[in-house]
Amino acid sequence: MSRASSRTAITAAITAALALLLGLLTSPAARADLQHPRQAFLRGSVAGLFLHWGLRTSPQHTSCSAWESDVTTGGWSPGYWVNEAKKLHAQYLVLATFHSRLGYARPYPSQIPGSCRTTRDFLGELIDAADAQGLKVIHYMTDDPQWHAEGLPSGSWLNSAAFSAYVGHNVDLTTRDGFGEFSYLQFFEQMRRYPKLAGFWIDNDNAYWERNDLYAKIYQQRADMTLSNNNEDTPIMDMISNEQKTGMTPSYDYPQAVHTALPRLIEADFKLPTGGPWWYGGSDEAVDRKLTLGRLITNAGSSVKALMAETAMVNGRFPAQQANFNTFAATYLDQIWESLGGTEGGGYLHGGLKPGFWNNGAHGVTTIAKNDPNRHYIHVITPPSGGTLSVRDNGYAVTSVTNLRTGAPVTFSQAAGTLTLSGISGWDPYDTVFKVITSGREGIHTGVTLSAGSSTSGHPAAAAGDRDYLTYWDSDAAEPATLTFDLGAAKPVQYIAVNQREDSTVHPSSGSARISGYQVHVSNDGSSWGSAIKTGTVPNARGVQIIDLPATTARYVRLTKTGHHGVARWRVDEAWIGARYAGGGSPPPGRHEAEDATISQGVFENTHAGYSGTGYVNGDNVTGSYVEWQVQASTAGPATVSLRYANGTTADRPSAITVNGVTAYPSRGHPGTGAWSTWATDTFTVQLAAGANTIRATATTANGNPNLDYLEITAASNDHEAENATIFQGVVESDHAGFTGTGFVNSDNVAGSYVEFAVNAAQSGPRTLTVRYANGTAADRPMDLTVNGVVAQAGRSFGPTGSWASWADSTLAVTLDAGANTIRLTGATAYGGPNLDRITLT
């Protein structure tokens, strides 16, 4: 059994209780931690089973012993409750027998007189049975004596005389202070008896408990125990529960009535039967499956624990309709459990797709796996009209979507920040679940500095951009209130995303401290703002809210709150700026889009087709306008840069290229490409440092830069394959083994046949040139070597190698210019040159 095995004499028990009470009255106060290891089982839970069961369970008993006898002879078994909880996929049970409306019974052999106490240890048996199945038990404790005579023709369920004799002074249990003293002792008795009892579920505070630091002393004696409070967010407690909230639209969306911010532990307790009291009142009430499952799933979608109340009869069994629902739920939830168990709510501090109202009347929530930030689930509780669902992607690039129940792939697309699923038929009546795999979030600016027009002490604007949901910005109820984002340089701006602090209700809306009306301004200097680029209203809703903007380029973005839904207070957990929408596909390795770079005197555009990513940069027509990229190099050394551009004019638009502030190319030409939608690539070599580097392309004429699409970095190869070079009087072949690349060049047997290589050098100076060749004849095949049109060596010997499949190296010195160079090898005799495989520069 879970209780302690030894019993003491009544006198010893009184003495021990009084000594304990006197000692506890002097213990120091303490505060609970917002997050603590004792909370692990609750944080890992999705649901609990709430059991209101006691003397007043129908048919009501006024005799404690008669009730206990009927419970036992009726076949009460703790295993039944545990198995029913498992059908509901609950991880804990809350037993409410010491309840003000159920006769204040203690379902265990308490040593403290004052109300019904059983001989059989029902509580201990339940704790043991749950523990054997990996579940926890929490015990309900009431603070309220006002119902002490309810249901009785005369007298009281409470026995003040017996308790007064026990403690040695007069105590009126029908007063809150007297009842507080009576219940206070029971907490410590239960802690001693039940080492596996997981915690207490407290139905409101009692002044006697608070004066005597009850909660701090519980933590001191049992550091493993949790405390939950009903409807009161008592800071020292681990969890706040929210009782039977109704009136929301849709009716199942329980979290609309929650007013506590994560990561605080939050619970929603609600009845499964649609009528009657919280306990069995004698009738078999129906269970609304849509409402119940909707509540369970929407709570999971907000990381709120669902405490589901069922009405056990005297013998512990549930009425038929509740029992039938449990059996149904066992199978139904099994099929989708991976989307609930081991997940957090999506659209809040854990990331995830946007929950709430979607397209064509659809509504639902999203969840995200705790152990995989790229595994998401969309729960469609109210389906849309038609076979298409559109959900805001919150910056996630989606790679696959499947129907969780069937495993069948689902057709999807991404555009303008929205994930669209199409071709869907056969919506589930309660919850259609889609499994969504992503490759992460993209297009979100980092390194952003936030400031505000007003803030309360300790809650500055910086807290809205620190990626820490334990901190938040508070606008001090100002209206208008401004939040300004400094991107550090002019950069593309596509949307603003805001996670408002979820410490106010959506329902009723009068309690909602959320932004309604807004304006968005942009600036490049932080002082000249001009007209708003976007005005509108934000819906009164939970989860991430996204404000789409006309694609623009700016350094500063200012969001102004001009109106509120219910309460002027405005608090923001996190806010960020999206440079571009997700879902454009993963860029090739080493590609850096111009729209994601730092832009000086230029704008982001997507008017002309053919660009990569989400657009390109149109620089102002002035000398000195530039685009600067941040690039990383694993090691120091040369790298090949490919700069993609378009020039729809007939005039050259040259750019100076600087690397880490040093000029690499004073001017690289970018001639006309024929049209602004016709793109060309300028390829050159630069020298990079290990780690972070900057590459800047600066306009050198009053015409400005060409339109710039991207810059692509590849490690500069020292090898240059002959088959990729310019060939005059020769062919590419692969019939002799031992070559590298895809083949080699077999020059025609004439004097003047050649192979010309285009190479780039990060800086001018001497290089070692190694030519790999094969000569299967018995005669020398000399070649002339020219560099940039100047003969570097005439008649260089390339002697026999023994066969055409035997390759040799010939090494010689050359001098290269910084930037582009040509190296030509020309046959000097009528036999032409040898077969050429590649050249290598070191």
Image (cartoon, helix red, strand yellow):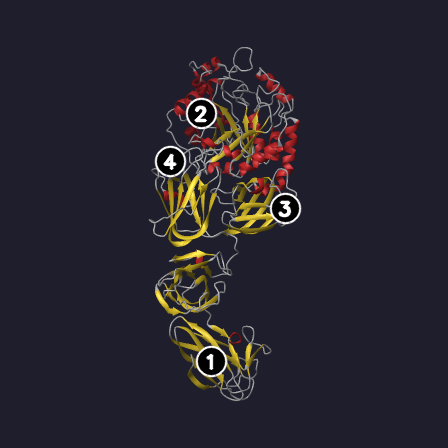
In the drawing, does residue 312 fall left or right of residue 263? right
x, y (%) of residue 298? 55, 37
**Earlier along the polypeptide chain: callout 4 or callout 3?**
3
SS type, badge 3: loop
- Which quarter of the image is occupied by the C terminus? bottom left
SS type, badge 2: loop
Q: Look at label 3 and name its amino acid.
A: Ile
- As measured in the structure, the alpha-carbon distance from the residue carrying label 4 to the one carrying label 3 is 45 Å
- As measured in the structure, the alpha-carbon distance from the residue carrying label 1 to the one carrying label 2 is 91 Å
Q: Look at label 4 and name its amino acid.
A: Ala
SS type, badge 4: loop
Q: Nearer the viewer, residue 549 or 755?
A: 549
- Which quarter of the image is occupied by the N terminus? top right
**Earlier along the polypeptide chain: callout 3 or callout 2?**
2
What residue would you read off at disc 1? 824
Determine whether 829 is above or below 580 in the image. below
Question: Which quarter of the picture shows residue 818?
Answer: bottom left
Q: Look at label 1 and name its amino acid.
A: Arg
| Dots 1, 2 in contact, CB < 8 A | no
SS type, badge 1: strand
x, y (%) of residue 690? 40, 63
